[in-house]
Amino acid sequence: MLLDLHSFHSSGTPFVMVGPTDNDGPLEPFTQAAREEALAVRLGVSRAVDGWLGTYAVGVARRRAMTAAFPEATLDLDPRYGIGTTEYMRSIGGCALTLECGQHADPGAPAVAYRAIVNTLAHLRLIDAPDPAPAPHVECLSLCEVIDKLHPGDAFAQAWHSFDSVAAGQPIGIRHDGSAVVAPFNGHVVFPNAAAEAGHEWFYLARPSARLA
């Protein structure tokens, strides 16, 4: 079991990224979702996100079809670039969670990390402590779309932060030609990057999920 600890750039509340549900697909086959979920609800955070690698791979496939327009955008053209320590851990038979503990300078982030470490050790019976009770409610969101920046003049319609809610039809960004990029459904903006270069990921969209309910 791997617990991968991170902090993030923009303001926001801590959250955990979990792997896929059990599946035998070609991208990220997995059989231990229940073990990951059992730990995820004991880390001390109230939000979980899944769907990372599948959504990233869809974006890669789209970018590969546009290589002529963005010859310099090489990193986002290989699906393996989306594989980090957690995805690798799952690929060799383990379980893994990424805990985003808070904004880089948040003085509370180290306490979030420490609590998660202790809870993980207790849950895995590696220390003499009771198994932490699961959180009564963990909001789960599934990443389902990634939108790329296509021109240096593309700009956000407002200053977005991860997990800001959007309503279907609401403008998220404005392309350089004045056309609006609107939310296709009621959901959340995730990982917005105003400094993204043309041909690279600009932001993700997530839907509410019943997983962990």
Image (spheres, rainbow, N blue to C red):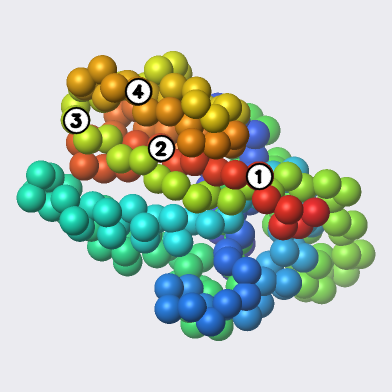
Name the amino acid type tagged 3. His
Image location of residue 177, percent across then percent down: 20, 20
Per the image, label 2 sits on a secondary structure element best described as: strand
Q: Which of marks 1 and 4 is nearer the N terminus?
A: 4
Q: Name the secondary structure under disc 4.
A: strand
Element assignment for label 3: loop
N-terminal label among 3 and 1 = 3
Q: Which amino acid does label 1 sit on?
A: Pro
- In the rendered image, which residue does mark 2 sit on? 203
**Mark 4, mark 3: which one is toward the viewer?**
4
Q: Which of marks 2 and 3 is nearer the N terminus?
A: 3
- Residue that label 1 marks: 208
Q: Nearer the viewer, mark 4 or mark 2?
A: 4
- Is residue 183 rendered to the left or right of residue 3? left
Tell which circle, 1 or 2, labels the residue nearer the N-terminal end: 2
- Alpha carbons under labels 4 and 3: distance apart: 13 Å
**Kind of residue at badge 4:** Ala
